[in-house]
Image (tube, grey):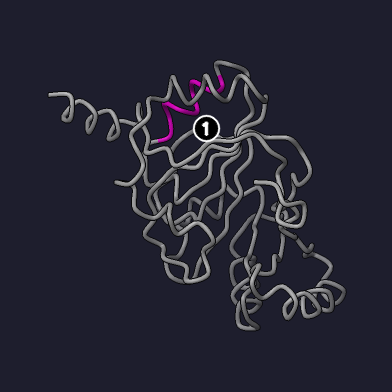
Amino acid sequence: MQAKESIAAVAQGYSLPLMEAFYTLQGEGYHKGGAAYFIRIGGCDVGCHWCDVKESWNAALHPPTHIDEIVRGAKQYSDTVVVTGGEPLMWPMEPLTNLLHSKEINIHIETSGAYPLSGNWDWFCLSPKKNKSPIKEAYERADELKMIIYNKDDIRFAEEQASKVGSGCKLFLQPEWSKRDVIMPLLVDYVLDNPKWKVSLQTHKYLNIP
């Protein structure tokens, strides 16, 4: 009976396959440098070959954790939470975001946008992947577009994606970590020629923090 109840709770979003949760500095994008509590949800089928958290892909490896427990941890540390993955929108997010907002916590999401939108977000960071395109609503909702650049063709893809977001969306090009020494000079030149973009770096890796 308990197993059935657990499955039902996950299906409704009252429990989530929590991979990890930790307090650190936001390392990337528009909010870099700010303190935030990260909630990493397991489960992802987008399958980026350069993903640096492949251990998040299999949701079954991460125990269903009730959102009450997740939110208690967040409230101890910060008034800003970043929900990431994996791909968090594989799961219903309304219960988690409603509970976090009831505690006066600002909520950011980092998502590929490939799944139907759920939850109420104060900041929506869209990071599209070639393997599985975002849905139309994700482009419309995006506050920030963060494109991971692994090779030159990814810049073409980034421009294609930028044409689909709103005019107020912040645009970032971020070198894939393992290729940063090769890609960074390319991005510097590109942003100088195309100043609508900004460069994002994974500063947490340079700082050697989570």
Specify the amino acid type for callout 1: Asn
With 208 as the anchor, is 20 left or right in this view?
left
Relative to 95, say whether 53 is above or below.
Answer: below
* Viewer-side residue, 70 vs 131: 70
Count the marks: 1
Dot 1 alpha-carbon crowd within 10 angstroms: few under 14, some 14 to 19, many 20 or more = some
Q: Quadrant of residue 175?
A: bottom right
Magenta part of the chain: 93-101
Q: Residue at x 48, y 26 (%)?
A: 70
- Image vertical order of residue 66 relative to residue 113, above or below: above
Please tell me which residue is depicted at 65% across the width and 24% down the height of the picture. 77
Q: Nearer the viewer, residue 63 or 191?
A: 63
Answer left or right for 13 relative to 108.
left
Is 57 on the left-hand or right-hand side of 103? Answer: left
Place of residue 52 in the rendered image (x, y in percent of width and height, measured from the top left): 54, 61
Q: Is residue 2 magenta?
A: no
Q: Is residue 12 above or below residue 54?
A: above
Please give the residue where the numbered disc 1 appears in the rendered image. Answer: 120
Q: Residue furthest bottom?
A: 152
Q: Quadrant of residue 159?
A: bottom right
* Predominant SS of the magenta segment: helix
Is 94 within the magenta?
A: yes
- Counting from the top left corner in percent of width and height, residue 20 is at 49, 39
- Who is closer to the viewer here, 63 or 79? 63
Name the spot of residue 201 as percent of width and height, x first: 75, 60
* Residue under the image location 66 percent in, 52 percent down: 144
Residue 117 at x, y = what percent?
Answer: 44, 44
Outermost residue toward the front in this view: 208
Q: Quadrant of the N terminus?
A: top left
Q: Residue at x 37, y 34 (%)?
A: 16
Q: Quadrant of residue 24?
A: top right
